Amino acid sequence: MTAATPTLSRPGPAAPAGASSLGRRRKKIPPARIIAFVILVVLAFAWLVPVLWAVLTSLKTEAEAAAMPVSIFPESGFTLASYIEVLSAGRVPRWAWNSLFTSAMVTLITVIISSLAGYALSRMRFTGRKMIISLILASIMIPGQILIVPLFQLMLSLNLVDTYWGIILPQVVAAPMVFILMKFFDQIPYELEEAALMDGASRFRILMSIILPLSRPILGAVSIFVFIGAWNNFLWPFIVVNDANLMTLPTGLQTVISAYGIQYAQNMAQAVLAALPLIVVFLFFQRQIIKGISTTGIAGT
């Protein structure tokens, strides 16, 4: 018998090394994603147009800013005269400091109070807990303008009118922030807290050493939201403060407009200066804002 010789099949031509990667690259982009991208671009452009218009107007002279027909680029070129006039003649630096100080204090106190209240409602079981949560949810639906008169009467009785604390204290109780932090604390595993309690840690130690370090994203987002709200708040500082040296930026700019009439270039320069700190805050902390919002959404708030 003769041994059968095995037949060897010739391998086919090897596929190019980058064929699979090219195939992946050539995958078509879904039409829904293209439509969503176009819509976002249009919305971003619609949001940026007023901002760009304010900046361009602030760089014109008063005559060119009020000239008709309106021109985007002035014939004499751009100038910083409006910014120089606002910073030298007005009290914008003082008002900016007042806004920065009051907003920072409101943010600090609000985060402390909201963290303590949120932790107590999330981790402790006591009589009346559900009723307090219901009251917090109900207070979110109450417009803040309804509380203006009783708050002013309270500040008047405490001699806090025309003071920094008169601006700060009524803004430090934020029911939405308490609820957001409470729902976030609910997602932290109880086993961490139980282990700390078995080791003899107090509630305050657990909050400071375990809960808050794990809640940095949401604390950052809450801080930024509170800071922006306090910075932009116009109604309450306008009511509680009459001293020009204690006014915040929104209130002070309104007095300039009413006292000197409409000066378009200077008004736009003041608006740009007022918005600049918020833009800087957003640019530096946008990751914390996005992370905090996404984490809050996962937490079910």
Image (spheres, grey):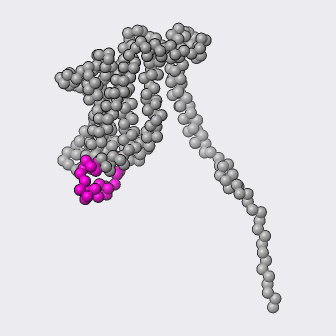
Q: Residue at x 29, y 16 (%)?
A: 243
Q: Quadrant of the C terminus?
A: top left
Q: Is residue 271 above or below residue 279?
A: above
Can you give x and y, in whole percent of width and height, for residue 174 in the image? Answer: 30, 35
Q: Quadrant of residue 42?
A: top right
Residue 37 lies in the magenta-colored region: no
For the residue pair 280 and 130, the one nearer the viewer reads as 280
Q: Is residue 43 left or right of residue 148?
A: right
Q: Residue at x 53, y 23 (%)?
A: 52
Can you give x and y, in whole percent of width and height, for residue 13 in the image? Answer: 77, 63
Q: Is residue 219 above or below residue 172?
A: below
Q: Quadrant of residue 221?
A: top left
Asked whether residue 82 is in view, the answer is yes
Q: Residue at x 76, y 68 (%)?
A: 11
Q: Quadrant of the N terminus?
A: bottom right
**Residue furthest out toward the right:** 2
Q: Which residues are magenta?
A: 183-207
Q: Is residue 295 left or right of residue 150?
A: right
Asked whether residue 238 is in view, the answer is no
For the residue pair 214 and 147, the one nearer the viewer reads as 214
Q: Residue at x 37, y 30 (%)?
A: 229
Count of marks overlaid on the render? 0
Q: Quadrant of residue 20?
A: bottom right
**Residue furthest out toward the bottom:** 1
For the residue pair 202 and 2, the one nearer the viewer reads as 202
